[in-house]
Each structure stands twice: as structure tokens, then as C-alpha cells.
Amino acid sequence: MPTYTQNTVELTVGQAVVKYLAAQYTSRDDVQRRLFAGAFGIMGHGNVAGVAQGLAQFPDALPYHQVRNEQSMVHAAVAFAKESKGLSTFACSSSIGPGSTNMVTGAATATVNRLPVLLLPSDIYVTRRQGPVLQQLEHPLAGDVSVNDAFRPVSRYFDRISRAEQLLTALPEAMRVLTTPGETGAVTLSLPQDLQSFAHEFPVSFFEERVWDVDRAPAAERAIHEAVELIGAARRPLVVAGGGLRYSEAEQALHDFVHRLGIPVVETFAGRGSALVEDDLALGGLGATGNVAAGRIAAEADLVICIGTRLNDFITGSHTAFRNPDVKFINVNVSRYDALKNGGVPVVGDARVVLEHLGEVVAECGRTSEAYRQEVAEVRRAWLAEREAVFAPSGVPVPPQAEVVGAMLRHARRGDLVIAAAGGAPGDLQRGWDATEGRDCHLEWGTSCMGYEIPAGIGARFARPEGRISVFIGDGTFMMLPSEIVTAVQEGIDLTIVLSENHGFQCIRDLQLATTGYDFGNEFRVREGEALTGEYLGLDLGKVAEGLGAKVHRAADAGELERLLDETRDAAGVTLLLIETDRRRTLPDADVWNEVVPPEVASVGTGEALHREYREVRDERQMFYY
């Protein structure tokens, strides 16, 4: 029989992983880029002699960036992937045990948001001769269970590598998922700590450059035909632009499509910035934290064209935002799972390709009526006037947070980016930020993950070297992961942090008051007996940031904040602007419900009465099924 030979190279598993990742590229629209811009990592038991040694041995292959917290590095990778339209990401390496489990929250954030991130958590010894080893979880009924099994439900692909040769199939499978928009999210390859240092003869060809085409898939003609029929019959159509539209870079196609037909556009959290220009068709953020104009037009829409959105409950108002009893849905999405939601016509395909195709075949549908477009314009103008009144500086010493948003918006220029994720900040930006004309907005609302913001600023800066990046953050979430200020300083990153200090988790306090009639455990107050009801804690978060390397400026009011924004625009390094705010005065409500159940039985507050009111609203909502 013939003998087949191939050239091989002896590498440890850690070295092989680094060498392979460095050779992976993506291509879309004939533009090629590295799939992995680099690697984040904290080195410890498990990876210090494995993946870390591989990064040290091949320093030019995969740039390494040090971080302070494993959750942070996944958040930074998620933000980088988002700003890279899902075409490039980072690998994240951690030690065994808590180093690995610290990444689970970030993994959930990546998967929920449909953004690619590669996680390389270290695992217990594959040989098991040393056990139980430090940080090992011993399960009495399964010898192969480790803490890394926690990654399974939050990963789109999971594999535990127990033999070196398994990399030959596991790594390409991981790349397939990372580069498939309809399937992507967190990809986890669990790497036992001893295996990372074991050597194997790998085929040289395995490390040749590989380009993964991110295809723009067209939709089926039948689906296009059904969509055109619905568009032609609609009298009050509405487009909901989601994150998938932005990842597809379909903003211009959306602009051309809606202006050809005269259809207004509202945006999800991830879709903010989809409307390129500020005109009468751009209504801004939709949903429970959206604006009143978007909510009013959505309520009576008879056709909702959803593009690249998974339709979470804040956007749909827990199925109350679209109140027309005859409303129909068209769902354009790369994922059939998302395209089937709300019983809509599933148009499975790339957003830009689908919109361009629809634009070519809907000419016979004609434009929406002049009366409808005028109604949209009038509702929008009324909202903008109301917004500007709230955004204007009042001169009060403790301004509402809305005035902070107004100051940031007046200061923003084309190419600037504002980031928010948890608390009241993303809601205020969803409701009031003007994300047209290049004043971009990055909102993480898939998991609304506290602590995401500062790491996200780092990841976004890696993807966007130009323009001002401003992290808008409350004091509650600031205290989750302020340590990444050190990473930004270490990397020489220019980053502005606008810290709204309102003495606690005030947006949740608002929710608590609305659902129970009292507040409990959400403000930063001194304990008095059994309750946290004393004076506000005398915290100085500015000193914390200063100690971590930031330059700190304090604003007495919104007018001074705007002046500081101008003065520090070109400042190098990390700049933190601290302003005390009053969360109790906010932007006008969107009149879109969101289901949070008040207590059915309660001995304190007004929860029982609120529960009866809740049931009345709940029973009136319209449900949509496949």
C-alpha cells in the first residue's frame, strides 16, 4: 500500500492555538481583515505555561493585551466585535477555576447580542493523576465535570479539548461559528492546563492562512414576494432597525428603501444610528425606554418591518407596543430563529442584500400617504420640542440626568461614539440621543450588563482610533469594574468617562416604587438600625478614578459639564468628568408598557393594588405566534 507523508511541526497545544488563530481572516465585500485583532488574558494556573507561553513565543503573531478582570476582557472583546460589525474579534485566555468562571457573564453578553468572541478558559488536568488539583470542582457523580461546564448554556459552540489532535477539528468548527452571522456568539474551547503544555506533531498546512467568507445571503424569492404583497397593502408601515442591520452595514440601503416608500424608522438599542440623517422619517429609539413619538406611531402601525432584531420585551413593550389588531410583521434576519418571531413573514437573508432587493421590486407599491407622513412629522416635531426643553441647562446645582445627555449631545460631532449599558444611562440615550449625522451610539441592552461600559470603551477604541469615545455611566455600575481604567492608561487609550453620580441604583429604585410602592436597598445610604435609610454615603469616586490613573474634573452643573467636554476634547489619556445628578427628573415617558409583575400579596407598600392594575394591562395585550 502507498505511504502518505506530510510535513509536520512540533508545537505545544498553547503554541498551536496561538499560531492557528493568527492565520485566520474574514472577507466580506472583497475587504479582508484579521479575524483576531489580538488576545486578552490574565495569566495564572492553567494558561501561564500554555497559551501564555505561546503568546510569548510568537509575539508578532497575536498582539497581547493585559487586563484587570476576566469579565472585563470579554466585554472589551464584545464591544470590539460590535464596532467591527462582527467581522473581527479578540481571543480571551484565562486561568483555571475563578479565572474561567469570571468570563461566564461576558460569554452570556456576547451570545445574547449575537456577537463573536472566542473564550479559552483553562481546565482541570486531563491526566487526572494530580487530582484534586487547586481550584478543581469535584462532582461526586461525574468525573469529567468542571466549572467550565457553566459555559455550555451561554456559548454558541463549546468543546473540551482532551487530546492535542482534537484541535484539528475543533478550531475550524469554532471559526465556522464565529464567522457565521446567524449562528455566532461566544465560542468556548476548554483547554486542560496540562494539555496546553503537551507537544504534538501538527501538520504544517494546518497553520496556513485561511480566509473565511462572510457571505451576504439573499432571501428566497417566495419570501420577497410575500413581503412585497404586505408592503403594497399597508397604509401605516413602520421599520424597526436592529443591530443586525448595522452589522450588515445596511444603513444606506435602509435610507434608500424608506425614503423611496415614505416609511418611518424606529430603532432598537443595538440599532441606534441606523438612520443616517435627521429628517421626518427618523423617529429614534422605540420601546419602554424609547421616545413618545416612536411609541405613538408604533401603536397604530399595520405593518412592522423588523430588520436584524430579536424583538426583546423592552422593544415590543412585552407585546403591547404594536396595538393595531390587524398588525402584521415582516422579519428580515440572518437567523431563521429570529425571523420567525411574532408570527411574521420570515425573510432570511443579509439585511443589505434584502433591502436592496426589496428596493428594486417595490416600485409598484407607491409611497405612503401624504397624511401619514405628515402625521409622523408632526408627532416627531412635538417630541423634539419637548426633548429640547428637558435637555436645556436649567442652572440648578444638581441637574437631572437628562441635562447631562443634552450637554453631551450638543458637544458631539460626526465620528464620536457614546457608550452605555446599565442603569438609567442607556434608557436616556435610547430615548433622547440623536444618533444621526454620525453621532454614534453603542448601547449594550442584550443583558444590560453592569460593568460593561469602561471595558467596552477600550474595545471600541481598538476598533475606532478616530473620534471621541465617551463612556456614560452611573455610580452604581462604575463601581463594578473601574479597574479597567488602568488598562486604558496602560494602553495609552484616549477615553472620556462621564460619571453621573446619583447615589445608587436609581432607575431600579424607580421600577421598585412603580411595582411595590416603596423603595428598598437601591440607594447608597448609611444603615440606621435595620434599614439603609440614613444619609447618603460620603463616597469620592473621583479619587478612585484619579488613583487608577485618570484625570478628574468635577462639574457643578450641566453648563459647566458642557464647557469641560469642550476643554478636554483633545485630552490625552483617560478623562473622567464627574457630575452629581438627580435621577428623579427624567425625559418624558414613551407610553410603552414593560411587564414587571408587582407582588400579588404584600404586607407593605401598595403592591397588591398595583398587581390588580398590572393584570388589567396584561390581559389586554395582543400575543403573536408562529
Image: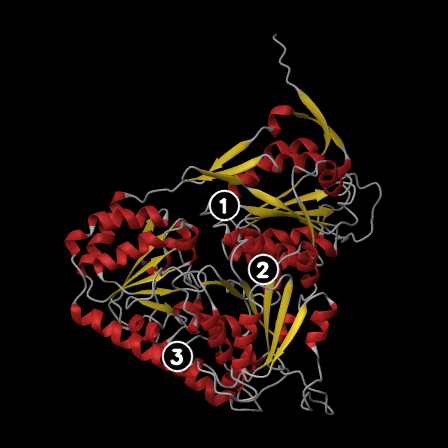
Residue at figure coordinates x 44%, y 68% from the top left:
313
Residue bearing mark 3: 387
Q: Which residue is mark 1?
A: 87
On the image, the x and y values in percent for residue 483 come to 70, 64
> What is the crowding at mark 1: few (fewer than 14 residues within 10 Å), some, or many (at least 20)?
many
Image disc number at residue 456: 2
In the rendering, which numbered label is found on residue 300? none
Q: Is residue 566 visible?
A: yes
Q: In the rendered image of this protein, does residue 532 appear above or below residue 329?
A: below
Q: Is residue 380 above or below residue 177?
A: below
Q: Tell me the amino acid under the disc marked 1.
A: Leu
Point out the image quarter for the N terminus.
top right
376 in relation to 99, above or below: below
Q: Element under label 1?
A: loop
Label 2 near label 1: C-beta < 8 Å? no
Q: Amino acid at mark 3?
A: Arg
